[in-house]
Amino acid sequence: MTETTSKYADFEGLRERAVALRREGLSRLLEGEPAPEWTKRPRAKDDVRAKARELRLQGMTYDQIQVELGCSKSSISLWVRDLPKPERKRTREESSAIGRRGWEATLQRRDAERRAAQQKAANEIGAMTDRELFLLGVGLYWAEGSKSKPYRTQERVTFVNSDPGMIEVFLAWLRLLGVTGERLRFHVHIHETADIAAAEQYWIALTGADPAAFGKTSLKRHSPKTNRKNIGDDYRGCLSVRVLKGADLYRRVEGSWCGIVGAAKRADQSNRT
């Protein structure tokens, strides 16, 4: 037997062994030999796919299946494209109405998924230490607060934001640093066409501050042709929070931010190596 014949015989022997293992579900490496059904892991959407095919065979359109199952039409198309198309039995207006209901079902499903993901992330935060709150507050202020410029030295602590959560975190951070309510001044900034009184009462309630600590509300004026997007009952403008005698606090924040940047660079360098 030649060397080539010997190698071929060895290969055939290995192939027969691989096929045997494949049939037992112990190998996935051999092409052309499908894995046994019991080795296949079920996918999350297998049941939905089977139901979609069943509904399609009953004569339902993509829009109707979407309303029924709440899945996207692109997925439905992929699942049932080999099945016969149902005969059209409705007007264009009826089809459009079904399509709208299907899209609404998709939006509701996406909204539920979004809220579930948000709640899961919120639950993962858990308790926050004073150090974590301090570092968060420094980053928050340096991103959204007023800062001194080379052309205008102005060491003041002023924070402006429309997000109630941002304001609450900022006030919690100030209390952590020992800033009392007597050193705080507030101003509401809002469009002149909004419900100004309601906005003022909202920010007073959120901050728990003495109404006397609120200065005159600043109104943003615009022409009648201005097309505002920030309208509705949940629009309350922005709140400005200013710390009196805040130069020392500003310098501490600026120095802490420099420390955070340096620490981040060192950590990044360590992660790269």
Image: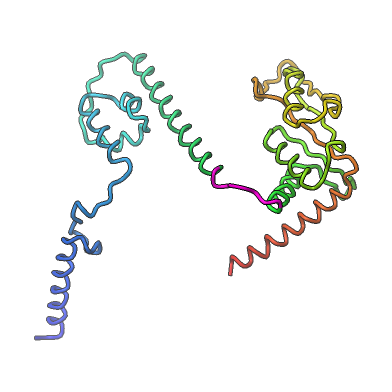
- What count of labels does the image hold? 0
The percent coordinates of residue 87 (x first, y second) are 22, 21
Q: Nearer the viewer, residue 159 or 103?
A: 159
Q: Position of residue 26 (x, y in %)?
A: 22, 63
Q: Is residue 126 magenta?
A: yes
Residue pictured at 16% horizontal, 80% vertical: 7
- In the displayed structure image, the side of residue 267 where residue 91 appears, left or right: left
Q: Is residue 53 above or below residue 24?
A: above
Rendered view: 175 above or below 54: below
Give the percent coordinates (x, y) of residue 204: 77, 27
x and y, in percent, of residue 200 in the image: 77, 23
- Image quarter where the C terminus lies is bottom right
Q: Is residue 20 magenta?
A: no
Residue at 85% over, 47% down: 148
Q: Quarter of the image holding residue 88?
A: top left
Image quarter hosting the N terminus? bottom left
Q: Quadrant of residue 31?
A: bottom left
Q: Which residues are magenta?
A: 123-130
Residue plotted at (36% across, 35% down): 74
